[in-house]
Image: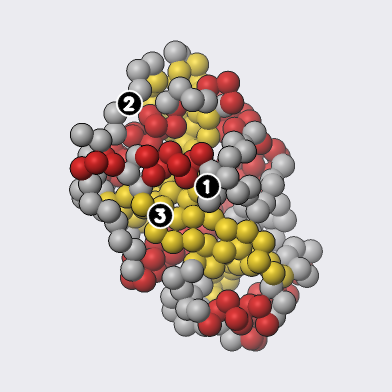
Amino acid sequence: MTASTSRTSLFCDTALAARIERAEVDLISTVSRAAAARSGIAGFVTPLAGGAASFAGAESPYTKVVGLGFDGVPTDDELAAVEQAYAAHGAPTSVELAHLGDPDLAALLSDRGYRLEGYENVLGLDLTTATDLPVPAGIEVRRSGDDELEAWLPVIVEASTHPDTQGVPWHDDFPAEAIEAAQRDSAAAGLTRYAAFRDGVLAGGAEFRTVDGIAQLAGAGTAPAHRRHGVQSAMLAARLADARALGCDVAVIVTQPGSTSHQNAQRRGFDLLYTRATLVRQP
């Protein structure tokens, strides 16, 4: 049987959502600090009502506010201080807001001039009931060390700059240089990397991290020439196996609504847990 036919659907209540958002805060904060140490930028990680405001560079995907809505609502003064910190760098304040969080937050941000600019979906898999995924023939996945980073990076950058067009497009469109810098930052932060080989050729890469029993499946990409051959499935299978071995009970992946990645995750047993809205205030 496959994971999608033998598993129990994962229900997401506010407690699970809060746990996942805390893991996201930990991820963004850790990588943001690594970015500052690696590149010397004047970054910041500011705690904010249970979440965090991170600046890891003007074009970094780690520059945003995450985790709000599960430990109170920030005051106007707290928000104003964060907005001013971003404005000092010429950057907008971008808030990722989970729809299971405090509903008063959306009204507060709207009153402060924030504009809805996009969505992303958080999907999860109950690792205590899901079965192992099959690995497609001809695909080998292994952990990728520092000695392979310079070969691994171009594959991820190419995959990220040539996304699948199905579904809702990403709110942010990062240039290749920003993607490469972000991947170097996540490497400096200690995320585990995986390399996928198709018939002996480096065809894809992915990242993996665990915190509080949550397996965060991040940074997966397949070079366009190797898509539709099971590379993503193989990388997913490898990370889920490692997540179980490390004692995680939930695996989480973030996708764009209606995208190929969203569709593939659901085919492999992931459930849609909640949606994050991206709310942006220009400086």
N-terminal label among 2 and 1: 2
**Relative to 87, is 206 above or below?**
above
Q: Quadrant of the N terminus?
A: top left
The x, y position of residue 262, in whole percent, is 47, 45
Q: Quadrant of residue 177?
A: top right
N-terminal label among 3 and 1: 1
Residue depicted at x 33% and y 34%: 237
Left or right side of 50 for 83: right
- Label 2, label 3: how many angstroms apart (C-alpha)? 23 Å
Q: Quadrant of residue 230?
A: top left
N-terminal label among 2 and 3: 2
Tag on residue 272? 3
Q: Name which residue type carries label 1.
A: Gly
Residue depicted at x 58% and y 40%: 166
* Mark 1 crowdedness (10 Å alpha carbons): few <14, some 14-19, many ≥20: some
The x, y position of residue 38, in whole percent, is 61, 48
- Numbered disc in front, either 2 or 3: 3
**Relative to 48, is 231 above or below?**
above
- Whether residue 188 is visible here, answered yes or no, is no
Q: Name which residue type carries label 3.
A: Leu
Tag on residue 258? 1
Label 2 SS: loop
Residue topped by disc 2: 135
- Label 3, label 1: how many angstroms apart (C-alpha)? 11 Å
Residue depicted at x 63% and y 31%: 158
* Mark 3 crowdedness (10 Å alpha carbons): few <14, some 14-19, many ≥20: many
Label 3 SS: strand
Q: Name which residue type carries label 2.
A: Val
